[in-house]
């Protein structure tokens, strides 16, 4: 049944291409964002599970 629906859609390949492009753009954005983090931000985030009060205060001070 699903195969019949896809066969009757004329632009199903376009949807697949658009999905691939969206996935690639999001992947590149997340990768670039992760690589451009400063060392101080990464260290603050690494301490979050251990002491949320101290690292939250230091992150808020940097953003202001």
Image (cartoon, helix red, strand yellow):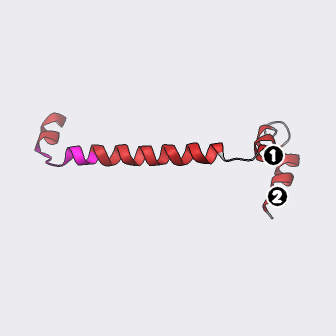
Label 2: state its secondary structure: helix
Q: Quadrant of residue 1?
A: top left
Write the residue at 29% across / 45% down: 17
Write the residue at 27% across / 47% down: 15
Tags 1 and 2 touching, CB below 8 Å:
yes
Label 1: state its secondary structure: helix
Q: Position of residue 9 (x, y in %)?
A: 15, 46
Write the residue at 82% across / 38% down: 47
User: Which contiguous range is marked in magenta?
Assistant: 8-15
Q: Look at the magenta stretch and give its main secondary structure.
A: helix
Is residue 9 left or right of 61 when viewed as pictured? left
Q: Earlier in the sequence, mark 1 or mark 2?
A: 1
Write the residue at 77% across / 47% down: 41
For the residue pair 47 and 5, the one nearer the viewer reads as 47
59 shown above or below 20: below
Give the residue at mark 1. Answer: 40
Is residue 38 left or right of 1 when viewed as pictured? right
Give the residue at mark 2. Answer: 62
């Amino acid at each position: 049944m699903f195969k019949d629906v896809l066969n009757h859609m004329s632009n199903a390949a376009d949807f697949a291409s658009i999905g691939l492009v969206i996935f690639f753009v999001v992947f590149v954005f997340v990768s670039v964002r992760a690589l451009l983090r400063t060392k101080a931000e990464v260290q603050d985030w690494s301490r979050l599970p251990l002491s949320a009060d101290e690292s939250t205060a230091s992150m808020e001070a940097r953003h202001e």
